[in-house]
């Protein structure tokens, strides 16, 4: 995304934002966030919890002085991590998908990192003072607004039922709305299916591990024939171990690249849908205002017209911002997906080459075994 | 040789015997007195075994022959008078020395066993020493026989077997005194290189023996006693080990000891049987010496067979309709072996024919201790699906699985040197039409289970009842047991691997579909194209996973399943050995009873019934020795078979692992191809 270049833009290099470490204390995950300012001179490291991220997101949502905010596709914040042991593996997996995988929340951190980078790179959102505080202040930001956020969401769901089907006045938005609904479902499904593939690979790695270990039990050094057989077993154990590592690598590749990419994309599709919905709400408001103007008694007509004009103006502003956002999003998402795909492909390629080299070495060694 | 021999059995011989006992037997063993005793008793009884041989050869009169009998009889009947001896001595007709030898041998066998069973009892020990001394004494006079034996026998490992052979050669030789001098130098020169070659080996007993030979007749006798003692001492594992060392000396000093000794043991056991009974020298020489050789030859042949005989089972075809339908398979044999009619044989066989073959082979060969490879199990469920004609994936899978199993089964059968020689096997591979195997219909998984159960029965019986005389079998059986457990565990692992792999294949297919849908809904042309390509890649990867699942299954799961079943067959052959042992023990008990009855008759002084009792004893003695030979033969076969099985197993696993690695390598190479093709597509996304 374009780095912010306006006056009060964030003095932080978006791509320098990294989550360098994560520590777990009971149920609480604390992320170490490092960033550099644009001149590249100074680096800052702050510690934030997931609550702080929610607070940041809420601050971004509720900038009252920025009317065009309604048309912005907010970078989606990953769901709450569930590090507690009270949650079963299955539940965590269901809620977080790919983000729950990997060692030490590695994938989750990557997702949070991407979120911060996207916020920091966003033309409008990066102007928010809270973002700067979030990234550089050693003080933990307040948490007073998190309740409102939850309320917002609930009322949103209620409205969604009524307004989702509202016919759009704009051809472009109507088709975007339809497509987004369709695509977001497809991406969700693809992500789920890919997750299953990765999980099966992990199971296979585990099964290989058991197999390899069990082969060690067949070792018997008592007589010459048994020794020969034991050698064969150990060789096979090594081979299966290599297979296991291969599966582990392949599934790591899957989750850190395409898995994360698909997950991010489906969250973004959701964010886009939310934005389109907010715009639709404005459209409904505008339509109501128009009706009110038509139906209004002469004495109130002037007032109604004023309201209608204001609404119209706001709606137009939102629509134009939304249009820009969508175009911008389409450009970046292709870029992001492309990067993930290339990364994935290259990683898989090198893993396959590694394994193939190992297997051919084993093959030679096995052929050479005197039996 | 001389009539005074019976007299000389008394005291001076003991000295003679004590000499050999103290030195050659002590040295190799260099262990506790108990073991010495075993060796001594073995030596003594074996020496006795040789006594009749020489007698037969020398055509000595009855009284001489009566002597060893007298001794053995005395021992048996707790040192009673010489009365029975005379009777015995009259029995063997002069004209047939060989038979004499045989019967004498039978008599001797008994005390020998007694010695082993009650080696802790002093009285018996004394008796053994006594008997041994007699034998030793005789040996002195007939050293030439043994010297000759050493000389004649090229193989050396059959040393103890050769006396009969030597005996045959010079039955009429009366100038024994002169001959030893000629023969011993020869023996010495031959023995020397061998002993030198083996100088590294800790057990130098043979060296001593042979170097002593030329000096006096006496040590030579010792030397002769010594190797002869060993086979009979087979029941004691210590002396067994000793013997195998010795055999190494003679046989293949260059070959690794650890590898060799078990096989030598086996050979020795083979060799021992024919040598002991000496029923007919012509058969003993032909079946004793050649037999171990034949085994070796066959073992080598079998290696060549791998290339000479290629069997494939192909083209499964449904014949008929409904519940009478069956699958017929084409069995193609390619061979260069001359025993087959032609180089290319093709027959059609149905599943029950394979079962029939197994039935026949198992009936013929398993009582002899052979490991008969089990045929694939009958699967009513699988076959019913095929019969009903459901052309679904699982029935295809079933047919392919069975085809492969039948192929492996036949390959195992023909790779067995003894089974390959079986006319039924040849008939199965050659004959156009086989008589419909009826009895096999019942043989199915259940039949096989029965076999397994029998084997497990045998295990419990064996541990409880069988006073295992050979540690090897005890340990081996335990190994087989634990291996069975391990293989079952591994099989479970591989099965879960296969299942996960199948799951992965299914999931990949679903993902591929999902990606294809994404591709078709995508607005961005380049991204849409890339996604569609990705869907194709994932489809191909799915096929790879599927293939690999099949490889996991056919290469490992089926291999392990086969070996679990084969281990069942291995246990069954241990069971057969146990049965042979049981028969022998029962026979011995019966003989004991007959002898007691005879003793009673003697006390009661009822000569009229005595003859009948003696006849019965004679008959039972024959049987017991037959049973013992059977047992030894089965034991030897089991030993050999288990060795073969283990070698084959290692070879089989290696082959499969190489195959598996090739499949893994192929998979990875395909993956590389796919990713290499996809990478530019991904990069082309603008």
Image (spheres, grey):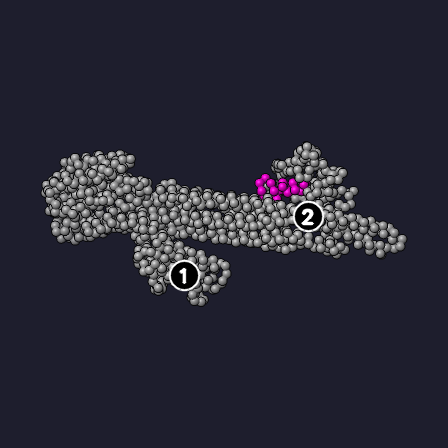
Q: Numbered disc 2: what chain?
A: A
In magenta stretch: residue A99: yes
Please give the range of residues in magenta: A93-117
Secondary structure under badge 2?
A: helix
Per the image, the residue denoted by label 2 is A331
A190 relative to A364 in the view: left or right? right
Q: Magenta residues: mostly which secondary structure?
A: helix
Mark 1 vs mark 2: same chain?
Answer: no
Q: What's the distance in space between the residues labelled 1 and 2, CA to CA?
A: 62 Å
Q: Tell which of A103 and A118 is nearer to you.
A: A118
Q: Is residue B186 visible?
A: yes
Tell me what residue is drawn at x 67 percent, y 41 percent: A117
Which image quarter holds the N terminus of chain B? Answer: top left
Contact, mark 1 vs mark 2 (Cβ under 8 Å): no
Task: Estimate the x, y position of residue B362 in percent, counting from the top left.
Answer: 33, 55
Reading the image, the residue beneath label 1 is B329
Q: Percent from the top left, x then y, of residue A119? A: 70, 42
Residue A38 on the magenta span: no
């Amino acid at each position: 995304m374009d780095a912010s270049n306006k006056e009060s833009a964030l003095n932080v290099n978006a791509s320098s934002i990294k989550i360098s470490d994560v520590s777990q204390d009971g149920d609480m995950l604390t992320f170490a966030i490092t960033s550099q300012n644009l001149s590249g001179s100074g680096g800052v490291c702050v510690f934030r919890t997931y609550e702080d991220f929610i607070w940041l997101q809420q601050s971004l949502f509720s900038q009252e002085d920025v009317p065009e905010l309604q048309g912005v596709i907010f970078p989606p914040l990953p769901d709450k991590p569930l590090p507690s042991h009270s949650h079963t593996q299955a539940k965590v997996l269901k809620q977080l998908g790919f983000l729950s995988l990997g060692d030490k929340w590695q994938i989750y951190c990557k997702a949070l990192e991407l979120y911060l980078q996207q916020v920091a790179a966003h033309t409008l959102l990066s102007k928010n003072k809270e973002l700067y505080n979030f990234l550089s202040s050693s003080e933990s930001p307040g948490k007073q607004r998190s309740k409102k956020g939850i309320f917002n969401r609930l009322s949103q769901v209620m409205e969604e039922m009524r307004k989702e089907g509202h016919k759009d006045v704009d051809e472009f938005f109507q088709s975007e709305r339809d497509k987004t609904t369709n695509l977001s479902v497809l991406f969700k499904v693809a992500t789920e299916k890919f997750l299953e593939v990765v999980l099966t690979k992990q199971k296979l790695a585990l099964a290989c591990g058991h197999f390899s270990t069990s082969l060690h039990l067949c070792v018997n050094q008592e007589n010459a024939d048994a020794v020969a057989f034991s050698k064969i077993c150990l060789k096979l154990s090594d081979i299966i171990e290599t297979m296991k590592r291969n599966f582990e690598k392949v599934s790591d590749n899957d989750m850190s690249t395409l898995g994360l990419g698909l997950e991010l994309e489906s969250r973004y599709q959701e964010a886009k849908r939310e934005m389109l919905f907010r715009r639709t709400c404005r459209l409904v408001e505008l339509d109501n205002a128009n009706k009110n103007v038509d139906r209004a008694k002469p004495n109130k007509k002037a007032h109604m017209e004023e309201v209608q004009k204001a609404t119209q103006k706001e709606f137009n502003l939102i629509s134009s911002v939304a249009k820009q956002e969508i175009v911008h999003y389409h450009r970046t998402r292709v870029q992001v997906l492309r990067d993930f795909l290339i990364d994935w492909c290259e990683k898989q390629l090198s893993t396959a080459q590694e394994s193939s080299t190992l297997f051919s070495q084993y093959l030679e060694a096995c052929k050479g075994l005197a039996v | 040789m001389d009539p005074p021999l019976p007299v000389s059995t008394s005291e001076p011989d003991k000295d003679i015997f004590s000499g050999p006992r103290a030195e050659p037997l002590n040295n190799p063993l260099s262990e506790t007195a108990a073991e010495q005793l075993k060796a001594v008793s073995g030596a003594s009884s074996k020496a006795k075994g040789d006594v009749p041989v020489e007698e037969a050869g020398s055509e000595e009169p009855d009284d001489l022959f009566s002597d060893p009998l007298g001794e053995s009889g005395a021992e048996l009947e707790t040192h009673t008078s010489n009365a029975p001896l005379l009777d015995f001595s009259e029995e063997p007709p002069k004209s047939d020395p060989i038979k004499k030898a045989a019967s004498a041998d039978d008599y001797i066998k008994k005390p020998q066993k007694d010695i082993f069973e009650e080696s802790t009892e002093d009285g018996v020990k004394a008796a053994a020493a006594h008997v041994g001394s007699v034998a030793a004494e005789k040996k002195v006079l007939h050293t030439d026989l043994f010297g000759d034996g050493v000389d004649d026998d090229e193989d050396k490992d059959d040393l103890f077997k050769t006396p009969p052979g030597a005996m045959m050669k010079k039955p009429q030789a009366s100038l024994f005194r002169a001959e030893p001098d000629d023969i011993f130098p020869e023996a010495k020169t031959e023995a020397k290189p061998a002993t030198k070659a083996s100088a590294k080996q800790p057990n130098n007993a043979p060296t001593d023996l042979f170097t002593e030979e030329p000096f006096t007749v006496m040590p030579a006798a010792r030397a002769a006693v010594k190797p002869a003692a060993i086979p009979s001492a087979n029941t004691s594992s210590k002396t067994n080990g000793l013997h195998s060392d010795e055999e190494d000396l003679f046989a293949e000093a260059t070959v690794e000891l650890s590898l060799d000794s078990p096989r030598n043991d086996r050979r020795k056991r083979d060799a021992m049987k024919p040598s002991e009974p000496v029923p007919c020298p012509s058969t003993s020489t032909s079946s004793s010496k050649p037999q171990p050789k034949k085994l070796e030859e066959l073992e080598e042949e079998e290696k060549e067979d791998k290339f000479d005989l290629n069997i494939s089972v192909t083209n499964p075809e449904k014949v008929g309709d409904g519940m009478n339908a069956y699958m017929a398979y084409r069995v193609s044999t390619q061979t260069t072996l001359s025993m087959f009619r032609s180089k290319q044989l093709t027959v059609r066989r149905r599943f029950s024919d394979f079962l029939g073959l197994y039935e026949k082979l198992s009936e013929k060969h398993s009582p002899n201790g052979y490991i008969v490879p089990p045929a694939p199990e009958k699967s009513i469920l699988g076959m019913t699906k095929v019969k009903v004609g459901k052309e679904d994936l699982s029935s295809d899978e079933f047919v392919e699985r069975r085809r492969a199993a039948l192929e492996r089964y036949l390959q195992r059968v023909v790779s067995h040197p003894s089974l390959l020689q079986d006319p039924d096997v040849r008939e199965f591979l050659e004959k156009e039409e086989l008589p419909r195997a009826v009895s096999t219909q019942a043989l199915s998984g259940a039949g096989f289970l029965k076999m397994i159960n029998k084997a497990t029965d045998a295990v419990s019986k064996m541990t409880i009842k069988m006073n295992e005389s050979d540690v090897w079998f005890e340990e081996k059986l335990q190994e087989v047991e634990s291996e069975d457990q391990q293989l079952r565990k591994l099989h479970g692992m591989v099965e879960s691997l296969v299942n996960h792999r199948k799951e992965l294949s299914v999931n990949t297919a679903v993902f591929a579909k999902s990606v294809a849908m994404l591709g078709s809904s995508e607005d961005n042309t380049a991204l849409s194209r890339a996604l569609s390509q990705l869907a194709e890649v994932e489809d191909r990867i799915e096929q790879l996973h599927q293939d690999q699942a099949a490889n996991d299954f056919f290469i490992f799961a089926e291999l392990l399943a086969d070996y679990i079943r084969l281990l069942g067959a291995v246990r069954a052959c241990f069971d057969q050995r146990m049965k042979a042992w049981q028969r022998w023990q029962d026979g011995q008990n019966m003989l004991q009873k007959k002898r007691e009855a005879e003793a009673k008759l003697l006390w009661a002084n009822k000569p009229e019934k005595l003859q009948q009792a003696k006849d019965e004893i004679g008959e039972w003695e024959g049987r017991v020795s037959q049973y013992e030979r059977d047992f030894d033969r089965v034991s030897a076969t089991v030993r050999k078979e288990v060795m073969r099985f283990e070698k084959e197993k290692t070879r089989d696993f290696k082959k499969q692992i190489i195959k598996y690695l090739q499949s893994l390598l192929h998979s990875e190479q395909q993956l590389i191809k796919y990713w290499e093709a996809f990478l530019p597509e991904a990069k082309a996304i603008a």
